[in-house]
Amino acid sequence: MPLSNRPSLTQYLIEQRRRFPQATGDFNALILDVALACKAIAKAVARGELGGALGHHADGASVNVQGEQQMKLDVLANDLFLRTTEWAGHLAGMASEELEHPYAIPASYPRGKYLLLFDPLDGSSNIDVNVSVGSIFSVLRVPDEAMRGELDEAHFLQPGRQQVAAGYALYGPATMLILTVGNGVAGFTLDPVLGEFMLTHPDLKVPAETSEFAINASNRRFWEPPVRRYVEECQAGRDGPRGKDFNMRWIASMVAEAHRILMRGGVFLYPRDNKDPSRTGRLRLLYEANPIGFVMEQAGGRASTARQNVLDLQPKSLHQRIGLVFGSRSEVERIERYHAEPAVDDIAAPLFAERSLFTA
Ligand code: AHG
Ligand code: MN
Ligand code: MN
């Protein structure tokens, strides 16, 4: 297809901006800077072993604030996000999986009206095995009171519903950028020759019907009864209550699972479980669940904690973890229903069920 038939990311953004005649162009420039960071990360990822950036981060601080092993590429990707977006005057601050505290824009740069939150490299345990990884980002407005005074962590704690943009880059066989500015979801593919993201998927919709689920089944013994019920019913296939066979996938890069679900449907679960009582889930609300949730909802899907829509949750802390279920709307709603209903065991054998008098 000739180039002129595929708008670039720049053209897409300019056309979207026409809906807001008063817009200054700051927002578009910010998204283009984020896209530039993603292109630089894509290059580093693609060089693999040749780039010298695989493996664990060698500095003393090789464990991040969440107690997770930092890979060299986690740190490199984080720096690329900071350096590419801090200078232009669009941002007041940033928050990253790799930084314990918010990053305030240095005084040497002008301060802008947006906040950028990101997971610079999602699925980083997959880097060394050459499996797809990605970056996830979320854009919030700076609250009015913070425009006048000091920026602090509380200003980042906004419900996902208030995001003005969100998306992710996927560093797979092709590099893609998936973006929502609150008007549907657009997918762009990086043209490696031009170095431009070109619009290849103008209006992505999560297919409503699905028979594919994604969950780390090694955690089965820690799951809550409604999650067990859902997965067991899927596994029972056409002989069970669902009356059809299901397929299962687990990549261990949430961003890659989100992309598969966006392209061909499905449901992803990383539910709250009782593996580690101090943890209220595995994935992080502000820079993993909220941006993916916004993309899913804009594509006609849904994202939930299994108890409520993730976008309505009032965040409590910067690195808060939550249980997360997202994908085809009807499956997510079914999982929510199972969580709202009394457990099947409770109905069948109330005295011996998990929540009964006779179990601790
Ligand atoms: P990150 O690499 O940013 O720490 O996130 C990894 C996340 C997510 O991408 C994935 O779904 C999940 O961790 C994988 O968890 P398991 O190791 O339990 O499979
Ligand atoms: Mn992640
Ligand atoms: Mn990460």
Image: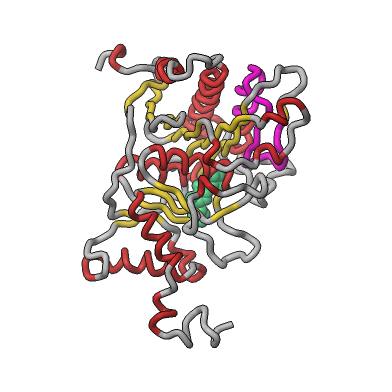
Q: Is residue 307 visible?
A: yes
Image quadrant occupied by the C terminus = bottom right
Q: Residue at 33%, 27% (x, y): give it.
A: 202
Q: Is residue 195 visible?
A: no
Closer to the camera, 337 or 122?
337
> In the picture shown, does residue 338 fall above or below 329?
below
> In the picture shown, does residue 341 fall above or below 58?
below
Q: Is residue 264 toward the left or the right of residue 294 in the image?
A: left
Q: Is residue 254 toward the left or the right of residue 327 in the image?
A: right
What is the number of callouts on the image? Answer: 0
Closer to the camera, 257 or 301?
301
Quarter of the figure with residue 183: top left
Q: Which residues are magenta?
A: 80-103
Residue farthest along the top direction in this orientation: 4
Q: Residue at 66%, 32% (x, y): give it.
A: 143
Which percent across, then down, holds residue 352?
47, 86
Q: Residue at 77%, 30% (x, y): give it.
A: 150
Q: Is residue 104 toward the left or the right of residue 240 in the image?
A: right
> In the picture shown, does residue 14 fall above or below 235?
above
Which percent across, then down, holds residue 15?
40, 16
Which percent across, then down, holds residue 124?
53, 43
Quarter of the figure with residue 137: top right
Q: Is residue 90 toward the left or the right of residue 288 in the image?
A: right
Q: Residue at 66%, 49% (x, y): give it.
A: 316
In magenta stretch: residue 199: no
> In the picture shown, does residue 16 fall above or below 175?
above
Which percent across, then down, holds residue 158?
61, 40
